[in-house]
Structures are given as C-alpha cells and as structure tokens.
Image (cartoon, helix red, strand yellow):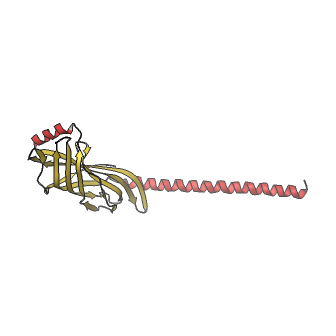
Amino acid sequence: MTQKDVESNTVSQKDGKRRKLYCHVGIGLVVSLIVVVAIIILTIYLIHRPTKPQFTLQEITLNAFNISTATTATLTSSFQITMSSRNPNARTGIFYDKLDVYATYRGQQITLQTMLPPSYLGHKDVTVWSPYLYGTEVPLASYLAGSLSQDKTAGTVLVNIKASGKVRWKFGTFVLGKYSLNVNCPAYITFGNKDGSYAVDPAVKYQLVARCSVDV
C-alpha cells in the first residue's frame, strides 16, 4: 500500500467518524426537541387542567313507545330529544369529533344510534342538539317482560338517553386527545295501557332539564 493509499484511507475514516458524529448530534437534537415539546404540552395541560363538559337533557318529545307481547316481546319507539352541552372551561376549548346518541331501557339499547355533527365549543360556550331516536320492533330480553308489568303498575318508565364518542381539548394552538366520552341522561316518562299493550299518546312532550352524568 502506497503512502497515497494510506492517506486516502485515513481521510475516509475521518469522514466516516464525522458523519457518525453528525448523525448522533442530529438524533440528539430531535429527541431533545420532542422532550421539550412534550414538557411544554404537559405543563400547559397541568396549568389549565380541563373540566369535563356538562350535558343536560332538556326535553323529550315521545312520538311512539309501543310494546307488543303477541309472541316475542318487542318495542317500537320514537323520540325527539333536546340535549345541550356546556364547556365550563375559561381557557380550554372542546372538540366533539364523534358523538352517537341512543336510548336504553334497563340496560338494553332500544333505538338505533344517531350521529351528531362534529362541533367545537369555545370557552364557556353552549351547543344544543335535537336529534331523532327510533327503533322498530326491537326484541326485548325475556327478563324485561316482568319489568314492564312493574313499570305499568308504577305508571312510569325510566329511559336512559346515552351519548358516546370522542373528545379533544384545545389549549391555545395545542390540541390534545382523543379521549372517550360517555354521557348518561335518565328520563322518567309516564305511560298507560291501550288495548292490552303498553303505549303512550303520540307527540307527548316532557320538559326535563335533567343534568346528565359525564365520564371522560
């Protein structure tokens, strides 16, 4: 190997070490930047610490709630509900990316899910939705037949209006999420007996203004 080859090999080794050094420095800078950004976001979150949104079931217009027990117990129901959501935070915005609303009776879903449009609530903002919920001849679990008799005797039926979806928090220019959101709104409605089947008169409106439980 000539002197020129030795010098060329030495230069190549130095260039290789320099490239590795630059690569390590670059990786270190990227990691440091990620850590700094994460610390900033965490600090902002801890300072503002968002309060979960507040939901209120304002009213229900009951168009149908008919139970048939001819063979298998089935329920046909139709509601229009008015539900509001309030952002109690003074410095944090709330994004609702996906929110499905439906009705349940004693733990069983009795209507299809109705999707609410995506929305954003600014500081202290309130939004109101009025979706329709309906289910046609939904088979009821066998144990619910006895429960219906008890509810008939009591004269009321407890229906739970529920919402589930995803929520994100907005702190200035930072947006965090997505977090699971579950809302439960209990509603007591009265019903009677018509021709041997449980039913209510159509288009009965119930003013509720009931606070809902919210889990995030």
Which residue extends farthest right? 2
x and y, in percent, of residue 19 in the image: 71, 57
Which of the two residues, 142 or 62, is positioned nearer the viewer here? 142
Q: In the figure, is residue 180 to the left or right of 213? A: right
Q: In the figure, is residue 199 to the left or right of 213? A: left
Which residue extends farthest front? 71
x and y, in percent, of residue 41 in the image: 45, 55
x and y, in percent, of residue 13 in the image: 78, 54
Which of the two residues, 54 or 159, is positioned nearer the viewer here? 159
Determine the image quadrant of residue 173.
bottom left
The residue at the point 31 percent across, 54 percent down is 100
Disc tally is 0
The residue at the point 55 percent across, 57 percent down is 33
Q: In the figure, is residue 34 to the left or right of 133? A: right
Reply above or below: 157 against 134.
above
x and y, in percent, of residue 162 in the image: 27, 50
